[in-house]
Image: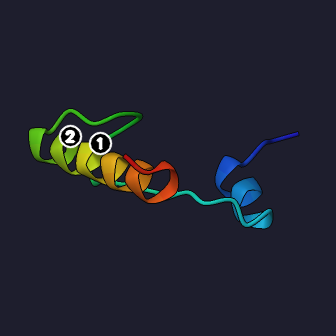
Amino acid sequence: MKFNLKASLAAINYPFEWLVKDKEGHGFYNEDNILESNQRILSFLDKHIGS
């Protein structure tokens, strides 16, 4: 049985964001992608748990 995290979270209306970048695998190595990822993580956390 294959587990799909994205589909499971969407099915229960659980808040999440998905970020996919070309030429990147599991994690980011390009500095611009790392910066964008970290900015989006901070924004998500601020939105859902506050600062």
CB of mark 2 within 8 Å of CB of mark 1? no
Q: How many marks?
A: 2
The residue shown at (27%, 36%) is: 28
Which comes sooner in the sequence, label 2 or label 1?
A: 1
Residue 51 makes an appearance in the image:
yes
Q: Residue at x 20, y 32 (%)?
A: 29
Per the model, the C-alpha gap separating discs 2 and 1 is 10 Å
Q: Quadrant of residue 12?
A: bottom right
Query: Which residue is the extreme one toward the front?
Result: 51
Give whichever of 38, 50 is nearer the camera: 50
Categorize mark 1 by other alpha carbons within 10 Å: few (<14), some (14-19), many (20+): few
How would you rate the neighbour count of disc 2 (Cα within 10 Å): few for under 14, some for 14-19, many for 20 or more?
Answer: few
User: Secondary structure beneath disc 2?
Assistant: helix
Q: Quadrant of the N terminus?
A: top right
Residue linked to disc 1: 24
Q: Which residue is mark 2?
A: 34
The amino acid type of the residue labelled 1 equals Glu
Q: Write the residue at 60% across / 60% down.
A: 15
**Which of the numbered marks, if any, corresponds to residue 1?**
none
Please name the residue shown 28% across and 47% down the image. Answer: 37
Foreground residue among 51 and 14: 51
**Toward which corner of the image does residue 31 lie, by quadrant?**
top left
Q: Report x, y in % for residue 48.
A: 51, 55
Depicted 44 relative to depicted 24: above or below? below
Whether residue 41 sits left or right of residue 22 in the image: it is: right
Q: In front: mark 2 or mark 1?
A: 2
- Mark 1 residue element: loop
